[in-house]
Amino acid sequence: MLEIVDKVHDESRQGEAVAPLQGDTRTYLKKFYIESYGCQMNFNDSEIVASILNKEGFGATRNAEEADLVLLNTCSIREKAEQTVRKRLTEFKKTKRDRPGFLVGVLGCMAERLKAKFLEEEKLVDLVVGPDAYRSLPALIEEAETGQKAINVLLSREETYGDISPVRLNSNGVTAFVSIMRGCNNMCAFCVVPFTRGRERSRDPHSILEEATDLFESGYREVTLLGQNVDSYYFVDEAAGETITFATLLEKVAAINPLLRVRFSTSHPKDITDDVLFAMARHENICNYIHLPVQSGSNRILQLMNRTYTREWYMKKVDRIREILPGCGLSTDVITGFCTETEEDHADTLAMMEYAHYDLAYMFAYSERPGTLAARRYQDDVPEAVKKQRLAEVVALHRRHTLESMQQDVGKTFKVLIEGISKRSENDLFGRNDQNKVVVFPRGNHRKGEYVTVKVEDCTAGTLLGQVVEGR
Ligand code: SAH
Ligand code: SF4
Ligand code: F3S
């Protein structure tokens, strides 16, 4: 479970293919196959794409070989993420040669970053569609079917796909992602996202609440509200004369039903408010877990990164979280070897990790992205070997922290939402506690979607192991 080292949250799920649609008995004339890379928002976008394609008569398949249309929903966050997609594309060459009419499309952040250049560089690609242009997919597919190359990479200031009900792909039927906003207005110097996803916009809260309510009524028991920076969620509901902030939105979602758990990601240290922390404290079903990416522990580097907070500010946020939400799970993202980073700066990052004692961290060596502030202004001057060495040190320290954090939970009892059968054994179930830790326990008569109280008896580096002491 502990997937660290140079992976963004969901890159561990890289390249997942979709399952045929559950409960969908319609027959489709054509089939599409989609693979998703990158962050949770990209995975959620694939579910929006699936919904749009279903309406056009395309059914999902898990098998690329039998598809009429193959789509890769791509990520540009680090060079490696792009290389993975390039490599994957070459694997479709043969099918393309053997099957006339077989279409290959690139969606998402790489499509947006490279635009028409992609069509020149990758002759095999028929469609290039940016993250705000998925509504035009049917028209683009039609165009591509005539043998032309089709492209739409326009970014929008309004598009939130709020009215499109995502078709849940590869779902466990218990947990689901709900995007609450798109884009990002921050300009972290290392980051490509503002360029690939455009301006920040918040989705209409009514459509968010409707989607979460539908999920609950279909048996789901956990929603994760997604945005690059959820704390800047802001919607003026003129009809109701109400301004909705992230804290108010959280409370509204939590009020749908006490049995529906609410999570969210990502919080920006400069923006997370006490109101959000108090909302979490007030509602038992808002999970006590915060992903608060620090990126670096050095004030000089934080400034170069344009993160707009200092280490002292960040530490105060950690203190506040611990004060208002004792026992709250805390995770982070760290970048090693950002431009000009010295051993002293690196030591500050290690010290910050000691201070925050994260339960989970995603750690990366800096990868320069064309067009970003850092690429334009600074030299990528930390040698690759040094970046990797520092990454190894950060990972080693984190391994120690995470093991300590797991060990501290032995003997405690937690409410766990069951997500399914454990990968290790058919006789065990797994779920998560409030703090987002995976808990494995004997199956008994329990089923996924139920809440049980588990007493932890043992642990590994990534999993708590226990017994059910009480279940509904
Ligand atoms: N919106 C989130 C992060 C999105 S990207 C936030 O503001 O925290 C996820 C993580 O990828 C970032 O937190 C950062 O740690 C990492 N990342 C982004 N750009 C990177 C780059 N150029 N090189 C290495 N890691 C990067
Ligand atoms: Fe990138 Fe910064 Fe926006 Fe996160 S907040 S998506 S790191 S620019
Ligand atoms: Fe990657 Fe784009 Fe997400 S660059 S991390 S898929 S917003």
Image (spheres, rainbow, N blue to C red):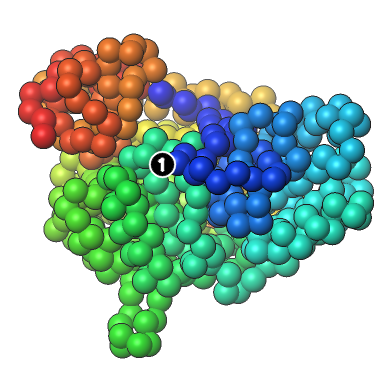
**Point 74% across, 52% down: residue:** 111
- Position of 339 with respect to 417 (left or right) is right
Q: Residues within 10 Å of mark 1 (few under 14, many from 20)?
A: many
Q: Which corner quadrant of the figure contains ligand 2?
A: bottom right
Q: Secondary structure at mark 1?
A: strand
Quadrant of image for the C terminus: top left
Looking at numbered disc 1 in the image, what kind of residue is underneath it? Thr
415 or 383, nearer to the observer? 415
17 or 154, nearer to the observer? 17
**Point 87% across, 49% down: residue:** 119
Residue that carries the numbered disc 1 in the rendered image: 332
Q: Is residue 255 visible?
A: yes
The image position of residue 242, as x and y in percent, is: 30, 83
**Point 11% across, 30% down: residue:** 471
**Point 51% across, 70% down: residue:** 201
Question: Which residue is most to the left?
Answer: 470
The image position of residue 32, as x and y in percent, is: 68, 42
- Position of 37 with respect to 40 (left or right) is right
The image position of residue 44, as x and y in percent, is: 51, 49
Q: Is residue 78 visible?
A: no
